[in-house]
Amino acid sequence: GASGFVGARLVRLALQRGHTVAALVGPDSHLHRLEHLLGDVDLIRADITDRRALDRVAARVRPDACVHLAAAGAVVRQDDLDALLAANAVAPAHLAAALARAGCRRLVIAGSSSEYGPVDGVMDEASAPHPDDFYGVTKLAGGLLAAVTGARHGLETAQLRLFSVYGPGEDPRRLVPSVVRGLLAGQPIGLTPGAQVRDFVYVDDVAEALLAAVGRPALATLTVNVGTGVQTSVRELCHLAADLLGGHHLLR
């Protein structure tokens, strides 16, 4: 997932910290987020759902650690259960096995707050997961399968469940960029009650957390939430954006 929203920021940060980076991207992935970094990374194209391809890549690169960010259905939810199972549930287990065979010491998996499902109140690591869509279920299964596979082969795994990540490079279809784009363009924005709450966390803070998980022994085998701990409603977010951009008259 190196060419994705979070992945590209992590690649940049890892290079800044002096790490040697092999960036695995999908066969058809666009590289616009990595365009200024391509000369500094070992770019590899492979299908994350291709078990043999994962074995070949791991055997060639022989990484000390791996951060797994590739996923299906993360930007726009989908109901293709077979595709979600292949990418989100099965692929992490195959990746863990391939890495272990190649001598890798740690796998960090990016999970999702969707694994908890609807929660009335604060979501913390002690909350029992009750995902209510295919995406959340397959992400939960992928983290568990990778952890079990890693334990069998001597690979440390840590899972970081990401909350509502925002920032430069985010897909324009998502909430924050769509609201900001509309305000900048002077377009009226129709608001629902917007009572649903999110924990919005900046992408660079997420990249810092993922990189920290690579090197901190205390995080091995743990599941850790990555957010701010602050709940913000969708309506509050729209009004905050309007405060910053001077567009309150556009909110309907």
Image (cartoon, rainbow, N blue to C red):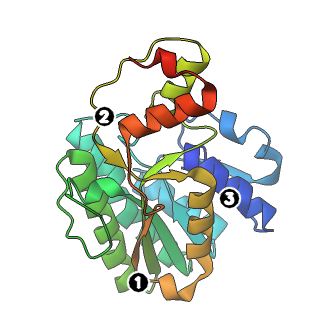
Residue topped by disc 3 = 22
Quadrant of the image occupied by residue 150: bottom left
x, y percentage for residue 160? Answer: 44, 67
Q: Is residue 172 visible?
A: no
Residue at point 30% right, 64% down? 123
Badge number at residue 194: 2
- Amino acid carrying label 1: it is His
Marks counted in the figure total: 3
**Left or right relative to 147: residue 34:** right
Depth order, front residue of 111/113 = 113
Residue at point 29% right, 53% down? 114
Q: Nearer the viewer, mark 1 or mark 2?
A: 2
**Left or right relative to 83: residue 186:** right
Above or below — where is 17 with respect to 151? above
- Amino acid carrying label 3: it is Ala
Between the C-alphas of marks 1 and 2, the distance is 46 Å
Pick whichever of labels 3 and 1 is earlier in the sequence.
3
Between the C-alphas of marks 3 and 1, the distance is 22 Å
Within-10-Å neighbours for mark 2: few <14, some 14–19, many 20+:
few
Pick whichever of labels 2 and 3 is earlier in the sequence.
3
For label 3, the SS is: strand
Pick whichever of labels 1 and 2 is earlier in the sequence.
1
Residue at point 55% right, 74% down? 213
Between the C-alphas of marks 2 and 3, the distance is 41 Å
Q: Nearer the viewer, mark 2 or mark 3?
A: 2
Q: Considering the image in quadrants, where does the C terminus appear?
A: top left
x, y percentage for residue 148? Answer: 31, 78
Within-10-Å neighbours for mark 1: few <14, some 14–19, many 20+:
some
Residue at point 48% right, 15% down? 250
Badge number at residue 153: 1
For label 2, the SS is: loop
